[in-house]
Amino acid sequence: MVWFGVLAVLCLLVGAAAVRFRRAYRRLVDAPVTPRPQHEELSLYEVAFLHGQGWRVVLTALSAMMLGGRLTAYGKEVTITDPVPRDEVEADVIKVIGLAPRRRVWDRMHRLGESASVDAVGDRLAGQGLVGSPTRCRAADAAFTNLLVWLWCTVVFALVAAVFAALGDRAALIALAVAVPALAGGFLAQRHSEKWDPGVTEAGRRAMVPDRNRDGDRLVPRTNDALSSYDVRCLERVVYDGVLTGSLDRLHDALIAPPETWDDPPGLGGL
């Protein structure tokens, strides 16, 4: 009875995980695409997402807020001085960082990069066939990982059952005969799992080619604040290259995590 109980639970879990993964996979690959109108300009955050995914969108929002005088950085401390967001991404930045002076902002960058507003930018581009949908890709990744966990648990169960079956346990032999098809179905369900790509598509790469002004500078889409030409060039480096320079040097220093150090208590002779 133990064999059949374990078998029933594992087969149900593998089956549920396989169905969940196939649904997530189909939602990803069959997502409807509406081509972007040819002359529609990309927004500031859309350009940033195309060039660096969600992380670049967060850097762009933080940089634009600092250049607009609504955020300051000194040492490793970041302070939001204007709590009124100009858009949804800034609203999430203010919510995650808070209004008090914040140290260790680098620990919150991953959370910001997967916030609802940043995902909305990526999903909007995905709906136009320019990138892979970040939310659908993460859902497929999670479903795939869940399926693999239960598949390998069942593999272990099948190996143990095979040992007992070889020793003459008929119940283990029957359980093994049922586990093998369940394993085959589970591994078949996760086929094509390597196919999806959350990155930029061919259409997205064509959209990434920046317009340039007469001086050859890459154009930055409209921001929430009126910026000087120098600050616009600083923001350009962030959007297209992910580099914080010039007016953004202090923000760069505040976002860089310090290197890991080893504690070497006295009297232990080091490491």
Image (tube, helix red, strand yellow):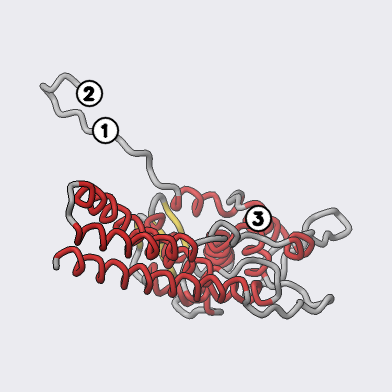
Amino acid on which the number 1 mark rests in the picture: Trp
Q: Report the Cα–Cα distance between label 2 and label 3.
A: 43 Å
Determine contact: label 2, label 3, CB under 8 Å: no
The residue where tag 3 is placed is 234
Amino acid on which the number 2 mark rests in the picture: Leu
Q: Report the Cα–Cα distance between label 3 and label 1.
A: 36 Å
Write the residue at 53% across / 70% down.
25
Q: Characterize the local packing of mark 1: few (<14), some (14-19) or many (20 or more) Cα atoms within 10 angstroms.
A: few
Give the residue furthest to the left. 267
Q: Report the Cα–Cα distance between label 2 and label 1.
A: 9 Å
Write the residue at 49% across / 67% down.
140
Q: Locate residue 2: give its quadrant.
A: bottom left
Label 2: element kind: loop
Numbered mark located on residue 271 in the image: 2
Quadrant for the N terminus in the image: bottom left
Quadrant for the C terminus in the image: top left
> Where is residue 216 shown, x and y percent of the image?
84, 53
Give the residue furthest to the top. 269
> Where is residue 245 shown, x and y percent of the image?
60, 49
Determine contact: label 2, label 1, CB under 8 Å: yes
The residue where tag 1 is placed is 262
Q: Characterize the local packing of mark 2: few (<14), some (14-19) or many (20 or more) Cα atoms within 10 angstroms.
A: few
Label 1: element kind: loop
User: Front-most of 6 and 37?
Assistant: 6
